[in-house]
Image (cartoon, helix red, strand yellow):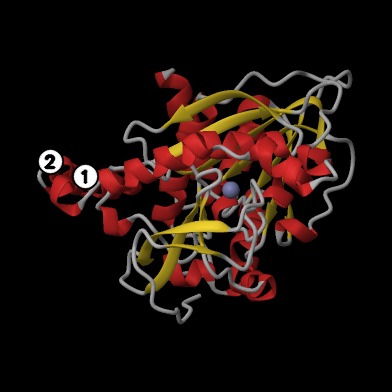
């Protein structure tokens, strides 16, 4: 994933080879030159709209192979989720269920849902369990998808998003948690997603927030995150795909942003369908947003970050969470499905 780069300095502006995925401008400004592991990664911000991306982009075929075979091994050191990962993902899934929007019920009476980037299947399984929806998943990684099918009995497509063809009726709900930032064409991904939604159907999309200040400034950019969004850029990309934003949400530490997008009953003319590229750029540009993102990222300096209690609070919270997980795992069933069922029952009792 690492690329060799020409020398550039933070703040430098130049015309990139590739046009911005959102507003089509090529003008960019350098935000960072290293990823959170200290490796070379040039991160730039489009001066037209504030969308942040890495430059250059990796080749799509390289990415497909990486997510199919390597990603989970590199970041989790495993080909299938551990019990700890299942517990952690199950708890996150319960939090996501708790703030799920109300989904319009189709005439058939059974909602259809699609979870894109299903991972080990924890959210897809619990969504079906909690709502009775018929849930399908898409997951590019063979090991995690195999685990989800085998242990949770999930209906999963093993495929990168841009090749996936989920059949049947349109979906009433599509969820996509921490996927969009990994894709080299997030606009095309949302446009594809929009075609799978029923009129009035909802998409919930969550990504890391580029305006986050909860982690040290040098820890923000990640070689696998090709794009970094704030709420406005994410919603505008949804608009470009013909989806209207209906809600936005931030995690307590503002490290993640999630938006709910709706496919209108009468499908909006996607802005991408405009013929004149200049008109498209003018319609989608958000120069005020670029100024805002630049200001937030420039103000969050290492000195300012470490002058607050945030690093200590974050480290303590992480330690506490890990100890809590170890304690909880002793009481949890060994079987992944039984563990998720237990989490669901605990949530029902608490709620
Ligand atoms: Zn742009």
For image coordinates 45% across by 79% down, the residue present is 5
The image quarter containing residue 200 is top right
Disc ID at residue 144: none
- Answer above or below: position of 139 versus 211: below
Which one is nearer the viewer's eye here, 235 or 315? Answer: 235
Residue that label 2 marks:
308
Q: Percent x, y for residue 237?
A: 64, 40
Q: Percent x, y for residue 328?
A: 32, 43
Q: Quick one: SS at disc 2?
A: loop
For image coordinates 90% across by 41% down, the residue present is 168
Residue 201 shows in this picture: yes
Circle nearer the N terminus (2, 1): 2
Q: Position of 237 compared to 96: left or right? A: right
Which one is nearer the viewer's eye here, 179 or 41? Answer: 41
- Quarter of the picture containing the C terminus is top left
Q: Position of 235 compared to 53: left or right? A: right
For image coordinates 63% across by 49% down, the residue present is 152
The image quarter containing residue 211 is top left
Residue that label 1 marks:
314
Q: Position of 286 compared to 189: left or right? A: left
Distance (Cα) linking label 2 and label 1: 11 Å
């Amino acid at each position: 994933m690492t690329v060799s780069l020409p020398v550039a300095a933070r703040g430098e502006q130049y015309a990139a080879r590739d046009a911005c995925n959102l507003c089509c401008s090529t003008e960019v400004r350098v935000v960072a030159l290293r990823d959170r592991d200290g490796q070379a990664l040039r991160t730039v911000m489009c001066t037209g709209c504030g969308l942040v991306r890495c430059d250059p982009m990796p080749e799509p075929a390289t990415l497909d192979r990486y997510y199919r075979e390597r990603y989970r091994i590199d970041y989790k050191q495993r080909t299938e989720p551990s019990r700890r990962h299942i517990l952690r993902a199950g708890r996150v899934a319960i939090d996501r269920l708790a703030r799920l929007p109300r989904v319009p019920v189709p005439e058939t009476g059974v909602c259809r849902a699609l979870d894109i980037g299903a991972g080990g299947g924890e959210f897809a399984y619990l969504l079906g369990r909690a709502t009775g929806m018929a849930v399908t998943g898409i997951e590019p990684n063979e090991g995690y998808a195999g685990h989800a099918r085998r242990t949770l009995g999930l209906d999963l497509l093993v495929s990168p998003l841009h090749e996936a063809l989920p059949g049947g009726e349109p979906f009433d709900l599509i969820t996509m948690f921490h996927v969009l930032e990994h894709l080299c064409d997030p606009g095309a991904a949302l446009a594809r997603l929009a075609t799978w939604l029923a009129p009035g159907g909802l998409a919930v999309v969550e990504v890391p927030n580029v305006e986050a200040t909860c982690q040290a400034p040098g820890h923000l950019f990640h070689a696998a995150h090709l794009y970094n969004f704030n709420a406005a850029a994410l919603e505008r990309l949804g608009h470009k795909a013909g989806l209207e934003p209906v809600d936005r949400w931030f995690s307590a530490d503002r490290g993640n942003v999630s938006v709910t997008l709706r496919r209108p009953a009468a499908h909006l003319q996607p802005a991408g369908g405009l013929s004149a590229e200049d008109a498209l750029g003018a319609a989608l540009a958000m120069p005020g947003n670029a100024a805002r993102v630049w200001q937030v990222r420039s103000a969050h300096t290492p000195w300012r970050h470490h002058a607050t209690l945030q690093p200590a609070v974050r480290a303590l919270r992480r330690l506490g969470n890990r100890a809590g997980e170890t304690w909880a795992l002793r009481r949890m069933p060994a079987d992944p499905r039984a563990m998720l069922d237990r989490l669901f029952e605990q949530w029902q009792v608490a709620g």
